[in-house]
Image (cartoon, rainbow, N blue to C red):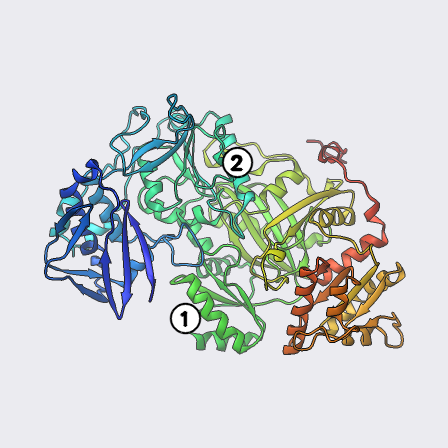
């Protein structure tokens, strides 16, 4: 990108662009000296000569010009190919072609197809530079391999398997203009002819089943994109096979179940990039592509794939764009008359500061087209806002960044559903235990929701129905709401399967992805019979973190996701399910010394946590507190008798009567550190040191007042005595008034 090196993969060639003092320099290294590559000399020379020349030439924004040397050349093995002596035109947009396989922290090939890229692709295909499909040999070359493990490579002359003939060709139906590229570089019409159709629409459902459906997987595991999306992809493929569709998966993560040999008919170990997906799409000629079950990476490819003529099954790419683009989505909510926090699109930092002053701090900075709340931050001051805006602009690149009013002490609500042509088929409403401000991937989610007003549920359902109709949703989707009292406001909508879809499907014993797959494929769908109010059990999802392996990381929760896993448990009530899920994450109850350290930063949280502190004291726990917390709880009228421990000063434990020394010596079994609302620098620093020490010395840590209060209530009710039971025992529990 800007000021650095971007690696560009087009037509299997490695182009390196280095931005030095305003100039782009081009080099193309090759490592294949086989006869096959040698026979392609003229082809590759012609391709290389046009690669940079046609890139972005139609935009009329030639920001940088690179003058070639007197006799530029490229080397392939021992061969040296002269190129024409001419000036090459490139722009800073070329750096956006550097694909990072969907990473949200770089400028990725995600939402826009550059005209130059399409023309390079046309030229490559017209010159016969096409990848071959190869099988991964699982039999050590002793016998012919019959596996469906496939990959594509340019280092080959023929495919390892034969593709069946189809009644309609899968090559582009338009006449390629590649041969006329050098004559019409500045003709806008040439770049506008990009509506491509790889084969006609199937005339019958049987033909569609024979051609198959391509499913894009989740890619590499990372924070925000993990096994929950692989479960969605596998559920989609299994339903396709049950319905008689040929299934084709593209995924490059061998850790996933979707890459098992028996899960699909065709499995391509390939990157989730536009060019590679199009190569496979052209070769297979499927009925369509499912982009909504693999997380944000394939979802971001919906726009470019649709622009190139691929058929997207389910919600259209244009409607996905309307939901992902913060500005378009906020405009749509305003047009529908649905409530949302006050918002403004970032056009300049000065306007953002003016907006923050108008609505008051805190405000939330929200980039578009990102996963797991990347670069999303809550700003409580002008200095924080300035820093967070710079971070969001860097992550979101040229995508809209919206600043919204952050609602304090609001409850966040998850709405997961499946729709068909804008009509909701099934839905589930879950609530976060923590207040809004904690990312949904890090939050403790309760399903069915236990503490929502009936009127709140009614408003959520009405708003979700209006959004589904406006976006013409077909397939899975997730909407996040926040409620304060009975005032319900919409936060965002994801037109894809969310990470809570496996949780919802397991809880309700109804596979939402299977239903969504049938809807996206145009089959007859029958909604599940579900009555959320009559379910006689509760399921709670708790997050798992890896702070012990992340040296120096602050183990606290925020609007950007930090968890690396999750676990869900069933129970007769919320308390039983919550404690079972908490213990399943590896959390240890304070039983060794029966000692707890309290450190609460603000007076509002001191008041809120007071009933829980009394419960811990009444249960016989030895309660410690940092000086401010101990002094507040030991005042007349409260008299909890907390033992005061000094806070760390300059990172030192400061003797025997300090919190750090007690943690190191193992005298503390659990730390409850509520840092929300901290404003003074010493509060933030001291709290971090205590939290970090708790993690490093294996002491149980709770950083949210809602979770701490719930834990106290669980111990008071003796929910820790409950015996875990098999999931099937809850499924067979009788319901009142209805039957599945």
Residue 663 visible in rendering: yes
Q: Residue furthest top?
A: 143
Q: Position of residue 575 (x, y in %)?
A: 78, 50
How many marks the image carries: the answer is: 2
Q: Is residue 496 left or right of residue 45?
A: right
Give the camera-side residue of 533 and 149: 149
Q: Position of residue 206 (x, y in %)?
A: 40, 24
Q: Residue at x 46, y 44 (%)?
A: 219
Q: Give the number of the disc on residue 347.
A: 1
Specify the quadrant of the image occupied by residue 378.
bottom right
Question: For this rendering, which residue is in front, 24 or 201?
Answer: 24
Single out the mark in the foreground, 2 or 1.
Answer: 2
- Tell me the residue that label 2 is attached to: 257
Indicate the secondary structure of the residue bearing disc 2.
helix
Element at label 1: loop
Q: Earlier in the sequence, mark 2 or mark 1?
A: 2
Image point 19% across, 36% down: which residue? 35
Name above or below for residue 160 compared with residue 250: above
Label 2 Cα neighbours within 10 Å, binned few <14 / some 14-19 / many ≥20? some
Q: Position of residue 403 (x, y in %)?
A: 50, 68
Residue 197 falls in image quadrant: top left
User: Which quarter of the figure has residue 21?
Assistant: bottom left
């Amino acid at each position: 990108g800007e000021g650095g090196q971007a690696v560009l993969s087009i037509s299997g060639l490695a182009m390196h662009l280095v931005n030095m003092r305003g100039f782009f320099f081009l080099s193309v290294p090759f490592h294949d000296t086989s006869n096959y590559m040698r026979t392609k000399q003229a082809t590759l020379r012609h391709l290389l000569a046009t690669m940079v020349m046609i890139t972005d030439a139609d935009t009329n924004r030639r920001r940088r010009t690179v003058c070639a040397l007197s006799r530029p050349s490229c080397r392939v093995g021992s061969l040296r190919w002269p190129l024409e002596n001419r000036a090459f035109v490139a722009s800073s947009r070329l750096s956006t072609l550097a694909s990072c396989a969907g990473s949200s922290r770089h400028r990725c090939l995600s939402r826009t197809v550059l005209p130059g890229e399409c023309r390079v692709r046309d030229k490559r295909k017209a010159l016969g530079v096409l990848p071959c499909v190869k099988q991964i040999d699982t039999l050590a070359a002793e016998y012919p391999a019959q596996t469906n493990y496939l990959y594509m490579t340019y280092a080959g002359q023929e495919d390892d398997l034969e593709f069946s003939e189809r009644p309609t060709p899968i090559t582009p139906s338009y006449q390629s203009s590649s041969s006329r590229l050098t004559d019409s570089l500045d003709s806008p019409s040439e770049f506008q002819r990009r509506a491509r159709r790889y084969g006609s629409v199937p005339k019958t459902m049987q033909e569609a089943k024979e051609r198959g459906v391509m499913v894009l997987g989740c890619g590499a595991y990372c924070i925000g994109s993990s096994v929950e999306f692989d479960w969605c992809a596998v559920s989609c493929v299994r339903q396709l096979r049950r319905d008689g569709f040929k299934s084709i998966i593209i995924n490059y993560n061998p850790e996933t179940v979707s890459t098992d040999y028996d899960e699909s008919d065709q499995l391509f170990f390939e990157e989730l990039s536009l060019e590679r997906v199009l190569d496979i799409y052209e070769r297979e000629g499927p009925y369509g592509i499912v982009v909504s079950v693999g997380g944000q990476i394939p979802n971001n490819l919906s726009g470019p794939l649709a622009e190139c003529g691929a058929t997207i099954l389910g919600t259209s790419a244009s409607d996905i764009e309307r939901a992902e683009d913060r500005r378009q989505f906020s405009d749509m909510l305003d047009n529908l008359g649905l409530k949302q926090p006050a918002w403004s699109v970032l056009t300049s930092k000065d306007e953002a500061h003016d907006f923050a002053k108008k609505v008051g701090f805190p405000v939330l900075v929200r980039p578009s087209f990102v996963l797991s709340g990347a670069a999303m931050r809550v700003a409580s001051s002008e200095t924080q806002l300035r820093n967070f805006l710079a971070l969001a602009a860097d992550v979101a690149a040229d995508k809209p960044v919206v600043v919204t009013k952050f609602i304090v002490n609001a409850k966040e609500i998850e709405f997961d559903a499946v729709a068909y042509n804008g009509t909701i088929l099934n839905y589930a409403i879950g609530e976060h235990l923590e207040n809004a401000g904690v990312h949904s991937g890090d939050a403790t989610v309760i399903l069915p929701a236990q503490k929502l007003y009936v009127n709140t549920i009614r408003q959520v359902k009405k708003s979700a129905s209006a959004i589904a109709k406006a976006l013409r949703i077909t397939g899975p989707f997730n909407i996040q709401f926040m409620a304060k009292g009975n005032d319900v406001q919409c936060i965002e909508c994801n037109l894809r399967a969310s990470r809570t879809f496996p949780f919802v499907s397991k809880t309700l014993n109804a596979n939402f992805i299977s239903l969504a797959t049938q809807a996206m494929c145009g089959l007859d769908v029958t909604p599940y019979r579900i009555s959320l109010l009559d379910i006689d059990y509760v399921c709670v999802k708790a997050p798992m973190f890896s702070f012990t392996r992340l040296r120096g990381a602050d183990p606290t929760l925020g609007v950007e996701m930090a968890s690396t896993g999750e676990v869900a448990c069933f129970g007769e009530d919320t308390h039983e399910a919550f404690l079972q899920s908490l213990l399943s994450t590896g959390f240890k109850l304070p039983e060794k010394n029966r000692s707890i350290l309290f450190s609460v930063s603000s007076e509002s949280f001191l008041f809120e946590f007071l009933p829980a502190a009394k419960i811990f004291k009444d249960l016989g726990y030895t309660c410690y507190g940092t000086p401010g917390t101990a002094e507040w709880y030991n005042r007349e009228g409260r008299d909890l008798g907390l033992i005061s421990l000094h806070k760390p000063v300059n990172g030192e434990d400061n003797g025997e009567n300090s919190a750090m020394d007690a943690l190191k010596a193992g005298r503390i079994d659990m730390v409850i550190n509520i840092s929300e609302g901290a404003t003074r620098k010493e509060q933030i620093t001291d709290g971090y040191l205590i939290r970090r020490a708790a993690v490093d010395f294996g002491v149980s840590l709770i950083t949210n007042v809602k979770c701490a209060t719930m834990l106290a209530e669980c111990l008071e009710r003796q929910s820790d005595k409950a015996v875990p039971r098999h999931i099937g025992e809850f499924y067979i529990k009788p319901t009142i008034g209805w039957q599945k």
